[in-house]
Image: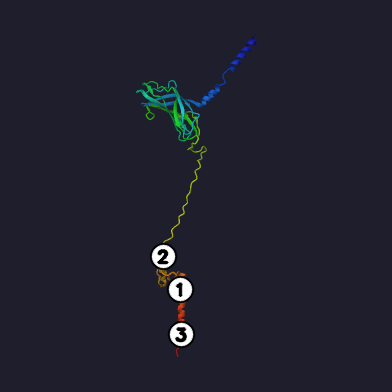
Amino acid sequence: MRIHTVVSVVFAGWLALASQPALAAPLSMERSLRVAAEIVEYECTTDGDKQDVKVNVELTLPDNATAGQQMSIGWSGTYVTGSELRAPAAGLTGAKLYAYAALTGIEDLTSATGVSEPLNVTAGQTIPLPETTVSMKTTSSNAGTAMVRPAAINIGPSPTAPVIECEVRSPAALTTYTLTVAQSTGHTNTSPTPDGSTPSPKPTRTVTTTVTAAAADEDDLDQEFTADDQEFTAEQGVDATPVGGASTGGGGEAGTDGRMYVLTGLVITLAACAGLLLRRRPRSG
């Protein structure tokens, strides 16, 4: 009888274990891929006073981010008990909460911004955090992998006129989460290639222009040659032929070698003439 009872208990326990749902772990793993939660410590400043605030921030990352298209990162938060943010002495009327996320890793992609519905809070009361998820918008010009982490929280009538500014105490200590931005069709990446190399430049069209130097002015050449001739004839005692004279035979403008031939011929001619004169002179007695 006791053996039968023990067997029944063991069998019932086995059935209870076998009936436990097997999907709990996969569901939890799937959720961790899309949602990142972390307690963030802020230092909030309002009216010169500082408050230490802790918020359990939950970021919902998109799985279809595409370069050139606006994407949305979800932000939701709840206070850590005893670390709530309280309204200043003047209270808040029509103020909005502006949530930010910091992004690094992709060129020209630095932050995402979201805004809540207007808030009305009396002085000293806890400022309620949005009950619905705040959608932080941004657009990446380039594809790649970005690292995301929670950033500042500001409260005021506009993002440029915050009444309360809450800065993250230790940004480097926060966990960063991966956000993949896919390349869109027909979109060209403007950032360097992943291996660090720069894209090959387009071929450069080269146009070559040939410039021919103009010939020297003939008048200048004539003047140069004439000056040389005048110098030479002055040394030899021979009159120079005027510029523009007959070009046949060279004459007085002949070069140094030409003048030697002319002088030699002149000497021979004079000698021949002298010889003829001597032969034709009558003999005396």
- Give percent across and percent down for residue 24: 55, 21
Q: Amino acid at mark 3?
A: Arg
Q: Earlier in the sequence, mark 3 or mark 2?
A: 2
- Tell me the crowding category of disc 2: few under 14, some 14 to 19, or many 20 or more residues within 10 angstroms, Cα based: few
Residue visible at 44% across and 27% down?
135
Name the residue that disc number 2 marks.
222
Above or below 273: residue 39: above
Query: Depth check: 177 or 119 in front?
Result: 119
Residue visible at 45% across and 80% down?
273
Viewport quadrant of the C terminus? bottom left
- Give percent across and percent down for residue 251: 43, 71
- Give percent across and percent down for residue 70: 46, 31
In the rendered image, the residue lying farthest to the left is 90
Query: Depth check: 114 or 234 in front?
Result: 114
Name the residue that disc number 1 marks.
262
Name the residue that disc number 3 marks.
280
Above or below 120: residue 2: above
Tag shown at residue 22: none
- Give percent across and percent down for residue 43: 41, 26
Disc 3 to disc 2, C-alpha distance: 48 Å
Q: In this image, 30 relative to 152: left or right?
A: right
Q: Earlier in the sequence, mark 1 or mark 3?
A: 1
Task: Label 2: state its secondary structure.
Answer: helix
Viewport quadrant of the N terminus? top right
Q: Amino acid at mark 2?
A: Asp
Circles 1 and 3: CB atoms closer than 8 Å = no
Q: Quadrant of residue 79?
A: top left
In the rendered image, the residue lying farthest to the top is 1
Q: Quadrant of residue 216?
A: bottom left
Q: Amino acid at mark 1?
A: Val
